[in-house]
Amino acid sequence: MTTKNYILSHSNQFNYYKNKAEKLKEENKKLKKEIKNSDQYEEGLSIIIPSYKGENHIQPLLESLEKQTLEPDKYELIFIINGELDSTINILKEFQEKNNEKNIIIAYTPISGASNARNIGLRIVKREYTGFIDDDDFVSPKYLEKLYEHSKPNRVVMTNFIDIDEDTKEEKESYMAPYKYKGHGIIKEAPVKFLNLAVITQAKSMPTFAAKSTQFNTNLRNGVDVSYHGRLYPKHNLEFYFINKEEEAIYYRSIRTGSISRPKMSFEFNVIDRLKVIGDLNLSYQNTENKKYRKFLKRCAIAQTRFMNRYLDKNPEDEERVLKEIKKHDYEIFPYEVLDERKK
């Protein structure tokens, strides 16, 4: 018996997720009204920057923002300080006073977490396009200018995404983005072709009405970006535009020595958390008939399932435990064949 048949034969959750999908259809009706009102936003670009204890690493970002070639009246910077306070607030106030105060907004929430901070930022934005930057990263001088130049009401604009070693300043290619890709312009195969870049929050801009149509899932500890974009894209008929490195619009991700960019392998991280993400993808899948986005969502689910395979490769004795966890759900999108690959 295949893994799929085994799990489905033991599952009783189908109606539960079917009812949730019906609720999502109602939400989509409301979105149509929001799209019609998209001209309510001011001209320009809003950038949301969550910051948690950023006093020791936010300076490179601020220096890169001071060098932006886009006119200050064409963008706003929204800093959301979250969690325990440190001197970041003073650093940002000094940055605000030194630069154009009108386009720099500083907010605070005692609740720590990038997801909650981003949701707060989405409630504040007032420009027609929105993007995100993490407080320990930085961007090239033309980054905002090129993002805005290529933005359109129906378009996601993506830029190059590369890693920088914080100590050596060495530039490294990132698996997150197609750094060697020479193309430029509309990517017809996106978001499937540029899957990694499509599902990260950074290195892109999108219409604000679309960005605000979906909230970051604050109940997720991992895979938050995948969940957000997996629920957002199918709601809108957006095209994808890639700016290659020749235009010098680059998002630099700082890799800090000793930092933990990903938790260690565990049942919780590789199985439980991934099933939660797939749950969000599943609801989105059930609520769209668009073949392009169904393919995209399946690819996202496959990527999440491979976390489970990696766990099982190291812990084969836990196979029954993993299958038991999977069969608690009835995800239509779940790629059972990926689990079966291990048996071949």
Image (cartoon, rainbow, N blue to C red):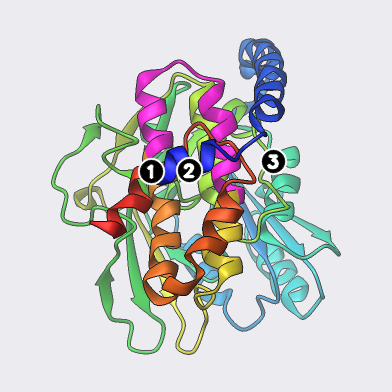
Q: Which residues are magenta?
A: 276-298
Magenta region, main secondary structure: helix
Residue depicted at x 68% and y 17%? 22
Residue depicted at x 39% and y 67%? 310
Q: Magenta span has 293?
A: yes
Residue depicted at x 69% and y 41%? 122
Residue that numbered label 1 is attached to: 1
Residue that numbered label 2 is attached to: 6
Q: Amino acid at mark 3?
A: Leu
Q: Is residue 301 visible?
A: yes
CA–CA distance between discs 2 and 3? 42 Å
Residue that numbered label 3 is attached to: 122
Q: Magenta span has 74?
A: no
Nearest to viewer (mark 3 / mark 1): 1
CA–CA distance between discs 1 and 2? 6 Å
Residue 204, given in percent of the width and then of the height, sits at 43, 44
Q: Amino acid at mark 2?
A: Tyr
Quarter of image, res 94: bottom right
Residue 45, given in percent of the width and then of the height, sits at 54, 39
CA–CA distance between discs 3 and 1? 47 Å
Viewport quadrant of the C terminus: bottom left
Q: Secondary structure at mark 2?
A: helix
